[in-house]
Image (cartoon, coloured by chain):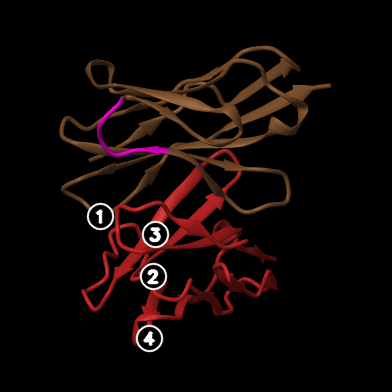
């Protein structure tokens, strides 16, 4: 069965720090990969996605993620975070032979002003 | 444009009662998913519908949980004989097709007394 692991449950950074949130999945076949973000009081929204092609994917608000197939990873990065990036971030995976999208447990990111 | 609409936004009920949660997906979206979000547990997949195909119920935690989707549009998640462990936020998402980026509703916060 597919599973998604997010290594950090809670991350605290100062503004302008660099960010990397880890995501690993367990499935050996072809996958679609997603990062979603949930800002305080708002619904989940798509940050970026990878289906195929360039493994470095750029999303909204300066976020990017790199798909490393050999490591089963899809880490989220941002070179310089802002206070407004405070939110919960979810990695999600879909195995292309399946229709389900499986989510990780989320990482709460808190940016200190 | 209209997003995914869920109702009620909050529901408080006594243990043992039945509850119905409603989801109105984005028009034209053929795929509809239900998830349960508990603190520290991320998004737990419950069930999904794709067009007129039989739903994938593999994530429903017990036979007290059921869902239907009428006319390929509105969906209702029903929880019978609610238990305290059913307390969570129930999220609905829709997408043009399965495996595509999902659009989430604001969720229904269910509290079982």
Q: Are marks 2 and 4 on the same chain?
A: yes
Circle 2 residues within 10 Å: few <14, some 14–19, many ≥20: some
The answer to whether residue A50 is magenta is yes
Circle 3 residues within 10 Å: few <14, some 14–19, many ≥20: many
Mainly helix, strand or loop, the magenta region? loop
Residue position for label 4: B70
Colour in which chain B is shown? Answer: red
The answer to whether residue A7 is magenta is no
Would residue B110 be visible to someone looking at this image? yes
Disc assigned to residue A99: 1
At which x and y percent is residue A55? 31, 24
Relative to residue B80, is residue A61 depicted above or below? above
* Badge 1: chain ID: A
Depth check: give the residue in front, A20 or B54.
A20
Depth check: give the residue in front, B19 or A2.
A2
Of marks 3 and 2, which one's residue comes earlier in the chain?
2
Residue position for label 2: B29
Q: What residue is shown at x 20% (from left), y 51% (from top)?
A: A98
| Left or right placement of residue A59 versus residue A61 in this view | left
């Amino acid at each position: 069965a597919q599973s998604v692991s997010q290594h950090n449950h809670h991350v605290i950074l100062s503004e302008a720090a660099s960010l990397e949130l880890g995501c690993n999945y367990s499935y050996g076949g072809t996958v679609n990969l997603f990062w979603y973000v949930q800002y305080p009081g708002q619904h989940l929204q798509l940050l970026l996605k990878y289906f195929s092609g360039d493994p470095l994917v750029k999303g909204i608000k300066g976020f990017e993620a790199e798909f490393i197939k050999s490591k089963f990873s899809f880490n989220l990065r941002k070179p310089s975070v802002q206070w407004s990036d405070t939110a919960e971030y979810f990695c999600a995976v879909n195995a292309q032979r399946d229709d389900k999208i499986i989510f990780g447990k989320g990482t709460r990111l808190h940016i200190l002003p | 444009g209209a997003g995914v609409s869920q109702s009620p936004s909050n529901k408080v009920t006594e243990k043992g009662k039945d509850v119905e949660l409603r989801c109105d997906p984005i028009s034209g979206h053929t795929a509809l998913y239900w998830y349960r979000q508990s603190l520290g547990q991320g998004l737990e997949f419950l069930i999904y519908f794709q067009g007129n195909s039989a739903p994938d119920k593999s994530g429903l935690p017990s036979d007290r949980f059921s869902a239907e989707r009428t006319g390929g549009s509105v969906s209702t998640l029903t929880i019978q004989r609610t238990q305290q462990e059913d307390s969570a936020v129930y999220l609905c998402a829709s997408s043009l097709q399965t495996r595509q980026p999902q659009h989430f509703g604001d969720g229904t916060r269910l509290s079982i007394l």
